[in-house]
Image (cartoon, rainbow, N blue to C red):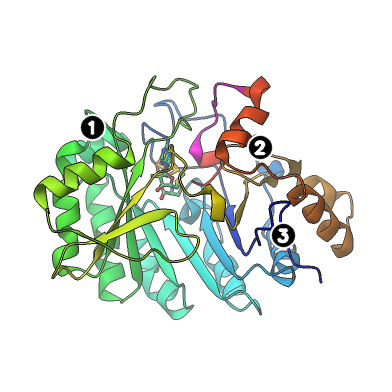
Amino acid sequence: MAKLFDNHGRQINYVRLAVTDRCNLRCFYCMPEEGIKYVARQELLTYEEMEKMMNVLVRMGVSKLRITGGEPFIRRDMMPFLWKLSKMDGLQKINITTNGTVTAPLVPDLKKMGIHSINLSLDALDADRFFEITRRNVYKKVMETFDALLSHGISTKINAVVMEGKNIEDIIPMAELTKDQPVSVRFIEEMPFNGEGNHYEKLVWNHRKILAHLKERFPDIDKMPDPPHSTSANYQVPGHKGSIGIIAAYSRTFCGSCNRIRITPQGMLKTCLYDGGVFNIRDIMRAGATEEQLKTTFLDALGNRAKDGFEAEKRRSLDLPISESMATIGG
Ligand code: SAM
Ligand code: SF4
């Protein structure tokens, strides 16, 4: 089957699949306090539809899948679906992004099925600040997941969105987690996907400021080589077991080597995080599309891909300011 390339010669081998838009937290950078209007259940891709779509994509060269959401582990029957995916020929890596609130008891099975790595979202190491950001009192549960991941030897990354007035005090303590733990702590620029359509005029904590802040405490921090297609610029404090990443998600410094597509919970294909969605896979599957038709549709969509996130954002000029929640995209 033809491999999936875009019109800029970039091969797509990585899919980010948001399996639900539902979430049990209300992180203020992602959702308003009252939540978002969830997609009707029958509009969500079914597990069978996700599996069929992934089978086609894997045959087109996709080897890496990230399961995200919403909170993936609050969708019913998530674990049997993951077991199925873990046995899919050609799918080499399955990663999951989770808020960790209900994940701890599942970790032994995640280990058994060979999940490659888990990104745990944790924006503060202080329980009060955690509550202020997520609006839910579940810090202990998330830390239980962190401990379970480490004790089971699952490769773990922590995702922390850096926000003026919210968690600046946490940056250094979080970076210090890398001293004794083999964990990658990644600091992410805040993006406008908060479900409300309002956003700061100018990002205060951009990747340069985050790095400068880290350098004040760790003047000898080393730049590490970044793996191909990495969205994070990676660093290590000499002698520390883990590493530190900075993700310029709003500044968009990494688009040139982008190898990923996103599928939303209702089956919308996004060829860029910043586009408004280019076609709905669920609709064509429910209309009876064959594998061949699905393949052609993916190839056509990628044949008209924006070169970077700025162009993608411009193309959605009728749909601005960006008002969707990251829970409907998956990060
Ligand atoms: N609920 C899961 C979680 O929080 O890990 C998975 C979905 S969440 C949308 C995926 C990632 O997107 C999280 O690491 C979260 O911190 C990040 N995220 C959400 N909204 C964001 C925003 N406005 N700017 C930057 N990152 C954001
Ligand atoms: Fe839920 Fe994740 Fe969004 Fe927080 S970032 S509200 S945990 S989907």
The quadrant of the rendered image in which ligand 2 is seen is: top left
Of labels 3 and 1, earlier in sequence is 3
Residue drawn 45% across the image and 20% down it: 198
Residue pointed to by mark 3: 5
Judge by depth and name the residue closer to the eye, 237 or 155.
Answer: 237
Q: Is residue 244 above or below residue 161?
A: below
Magenta segment main secondary structure: loop
Q: Quadrant of the N terminus?
A: bottom right
- Report if residue 226 lies within the magenta region: no
Distance (Cα) linking label 3 and label 1: 40 Å
Q: Which residues are magenta?
A: 320-326
Look at label 3 and name its amino acid.
Phe
- Do we see residue 137 in this rendering? no
Look at label 1 and name its amino acid.
Lys
**Neighbours of disc 1 within 10 Å: few (<14), some (14-19), many (20+):** some
Residue drawn 73% across the image and 40% down it: 278
- In screen coordinates, is 251 left or right of 89? left
Q: Quadrant of residue 123?
A: top left
Judging from the image, what secondary structure is the residue with disc 1 in?
A: loop
Look at label 2 and name its amino acid.
Ala
Of labels 2 and 1, earlier in sequence is 2
Distance (Cα) linking label 2 and label 3: 33 Å
Nearest to viewer (mark 2 / mark 1): 1
Q: Quadrant of residue 279?
A: top right
Q: Are marks 2 and 1 in contact (CB under 8 Å)?
A: no
- Report if residue 324 lies within the magenta region: yes
Residue pointed to by mark 1: 166
Residue drawn 56% across the image and 34% down it: 310
**Neighbours of disc 3 within 10 Å: few (<14), some (14-19), many (20+):** some
Any atom of ligand 2 within 8 Å of the CB at mark 2?
Answer: no
- In screen coordinates, is 68 left or right of 190? right
